[in-house]
Image (cartoon, helix red, strand yellow):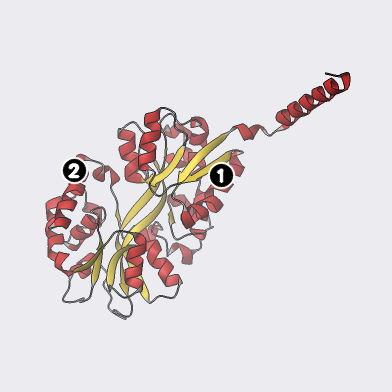
Amino acid sequence: MTIASSYLSRRALLAAATILTSMPAYAAEQITFVSQGGAYQKAQTVAILDPSAKKLGITINQDSIPDAWPAVKSQVASGKPTWDVVDVPTGYCLRGGEQGLFEKLDFSKLPNGAAMPEAYRSAYSVAYEFYSSVLAYSQKKFPSGAPASWADFWDVKKFPGRRALRNHPIATLEAALMADGVAPDKLYPLDVDRAFKKLEEIKPNITVWWTSGAQSAQLLNDGEVDMVMAWNGRVSALINEGAKVSFTFNQGILQSTSLCILKDAPNLSTAVKFLNEAVDPVHQANLPLHIDYGPANPKAFDTGVIKPERAAQLPSAPDNAAKQALMSYAWWSSPAGEAAEKRWVSFMQK
């Protein structure tokens, strides 16, 4: 090697070292966040992920998968998970925690989570957003005197028409019990026998048992059914497109998606910081500005970010939440809940 080439090599090395040492310190601090993709994850990115990354000075890598549960189990089983934080239905967080798949949370490090209602968090999770299973109906079929309760949905004489329910016991059993007179705040533990008896009563009048949110909305939009249990966001989307449909939050079933951290996550301490930041009231208040989901942190409604007219459309707004049943994921994750899910299969096969 010549003196000149040696000198150039040393200069290249020095330049590389300078670049590395001058890189921002936060570049080393990162997490991988996993959600469900689509418009939902895009809204999360703008409302919560990007602002959280900026405020904490971290990098948030993203992955998306409609159902993360199988991948969570395989990643943890491998002993070397690559994901840190996942956004999944709350019931998975509870089951995963019990099965050793998720980290137990130290709420002394999660002041935003600790300040939320106890029912909105568990030892392994913090609620992230809310949606509702609601009674939706065609305004063409019911221009006035529309069904306003699950008892109305079950009343085929007073409210004739084609009906659809979800082909799944979660929320459907709760609706059946409310139709039978159980108060929304007295549902749990579910009287499973009573719920299935009530479902047997309405079963001959169910035109379609839907299996996806898109299907439930399409059924209503196309006029294939006159009333349906549906997720509020799906119906709101139809309304925004000009469809003659509506829904009521009365006796809705308030459900949540939660954040949980994989066991032995590669960036555990950063994941905890992010989890706390993700449920910050202002970040939470930004979410419904981009999508029809309600913030999980009730303090979001005190920020002034969500205007009253927008709050009226959101499932977790205090006035709307008071009319609904709060899903007990603890019950659904219990042996009784798992038995009810198995019984559902037999019910549908009859």
Q: Amino acid at mark 2?
A: Ala
Residue for point 54% across, 52% down: 47
Question: As displayed, is residue 253 above or below residue 76?
Answer: below
| Residue labelled with disc 2 | 336
The residue sitting at 42% across, 61% down in the picture is 314
Q: Residue at x 55, y 41 (%)?
A: 60
Residue 160 place in picture, x, y as percent: 20, 77
Q: Is residue 232 visible?
A: yes
Q: Earlier in the sequence, mark 1 or mark 2?
A: 1
Provide residue 75's location: percent of width, then percent of height.
40, 34
Dividing the picture into quadrants, the one containing residue 315 is bottom left
Is residue 332 left or right of 59 when viewed as pictured? left
Image quarter in which the C terminus is found: bottom left
Q: Is residue 114 above or below residue 223?
A: above
Quadrant (top left/top right/bottom left/bottom right) for the N terminus = top right
In the picture as drawn, the residue positioned furthest to the right comes out as 4
Numbered tag placed on residue 286 in the rendering: none
Residue 180 sits in which quadrant?
Answer: bottom left
The answer to the question of whether label 1 and label 2 lie on touching residues, with beta carbons closer than 8 A, is no
Label 1 to label 2: alpha-carbon separation: 39 Å
Residue 103 visible to an observer of this rendering: no
Secondary element under disc 2, as helix, strand or loop, is helix
- For label 1, the SS is helix
Q: Amino acid at mark 1?
A: Ser
On the image, the x and y values in percent for residue 320 come to 36, 61
> Disc 1 marks which residue?
52
> For the point 26% across and 42% down, which residue is it?
333
- Between 5 and 101, the one lying in front of the other is 5
